[in-house]
Image: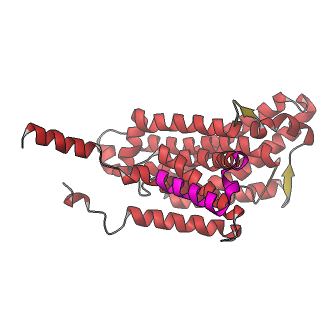
Amino acid sequence: MSEAQADSGGARHGFRIDIKSVGPMIALLLLCILGYVLNPAFASEGNLTNILTRSAFIGIIAVGATFVITAGGIDLSVGSMAAVISGVMIITMNSAIDTFGPGLTTVLLGCGCSIILGLGAGMINGLLTTKGKIEAFIVTLGTMGIFRSLVTYFADGGTLALDFGIRSVYRPVYYGDFLGLPIPIWVFICVALVGWFLLNRTTFGRYCTAIGSNEGVAKYSAVNVDRIKTMTYVIQGLCVSLATIIYVPRLGSASASTGVLWELEAIAAVIIGGTVLKGGYGRIGGTVIGALILTTIGNILNLTDLVSNYLNGTMQGLIIIIAVWLQRGPWQKPASSQT
């Protein structure tokens, strides 16, 4: 092969479109066009801001889920974890009023409580999975039930409401803005950037990918598999706590219905974004797009009468099934046959 031919071949290879990378972006673009065609109000500034803000909750959680899934794990407890953290935050802040008053100190105390609970819950899931040698599906299914029952117990079967005096101090965390963008969007951006750096530019991220690809080989390569996998669940717990901090001032309450189906949405966002469900490959950027896609679908359902918005969970379930099927479709060549 001549040098010119080699350069030509390299150029062709360089400009080849990676469907796995650009596919989610194309899907989001087509959804936005569809939303505008069905209802021009979709493109209004207020509606687009609402989509971005609503995406922040699931997007932040999904960033943590990307690490867990990339390392070959799964976490079904994130919605219930968010519910119990919300409940304890509210109880803590309401109780602290007598000592610190309805001010910033009380809010910071509640936020600190959220961080500690998120890290602790993630650590429990991670240790039970790694040291306890229990399948992640079973562990997180069990803790999902535990967390959900705890918030029901704390609320005595009802709803925990944040004291009205604290709400006025806490509301800007959700309803406030900075440089024209709501605070939740900024938090989402920061979490996504840190997540991208950890996954793509650190040894920890490479280890997550290696463990998800082949855990046995990773062990023989002197990777501390248990520690890395546990840390992915800790990161997941931290992301849940951050999402909860910006979620609580939105409604100012917590109940057994808080966070329902958040685990489905988080997993859907990760899979739609191109992260392989069986592990070994993760994309933070794709996860961000996946979260936006899910929120956009829900927004379109709310703006139109084509499909009932009560079927949003059905749409998300179908999306997960289709996304995994596309990853494992018959057109995917076995690794041994690829050259």
Q: Please tell me which residue is depicted at 30% across the width and 48% down the height of the picture.
A: 16
Vertical placement of residue 327 versus 199, above or below: below
Residue 194 percent across, percent down from the top left: 53, 34
In magenta segment, residue 170 = no
Q: Main secondary structure of the magenta part?
A: helix
Asked if residue 74 can be seen in this view, the reply is no
Residue 50 percent across, percent down from the top left: 70, 48
Residue 128 percent across, percent down from the top left: 54, 51
Q: Please tell me which residue is depicted at 80% across the width and 57% down the height of the picture.
A: 153
Q: Nearer the viewer, residue 87 or 70?
A: 70
Vertical placement of residue 85 versus 159, above or below: above
Residue 10, by quadrant, is top left
Left or right of 240 on screen, residue 328? left
Q: Quadrant of the image for the C terminus?
A: bottom left
What's drawn in magenta, residue-wise? 25-47
Q: Quadrant of the image for the N terminus?
A: top left
Q: Residue furthest left?
A: 1
Q: Please tell me which residue is depicted at 69% across the width and 29% down the height of the picture.
A: 179
Left or right of 245 on screen, residue 159? right
Number of marks in the image? 0
Vertical placement of residue 175 versus 337, above or below: above
Residue 222, by quadrant, is top left
Q: Nearer the viewer, residue 184 or 76?
A: 184
Residue 330 percent across, percent down from the top left: 32, 69
In magenta segment, residue 39 = yes
Asked if residue 209 can be seen in this view, the reply is yes
Q: Nearer the viewer, residue 132 or 168?
A: 168
Left or right of 120 on screen, residue 333? left
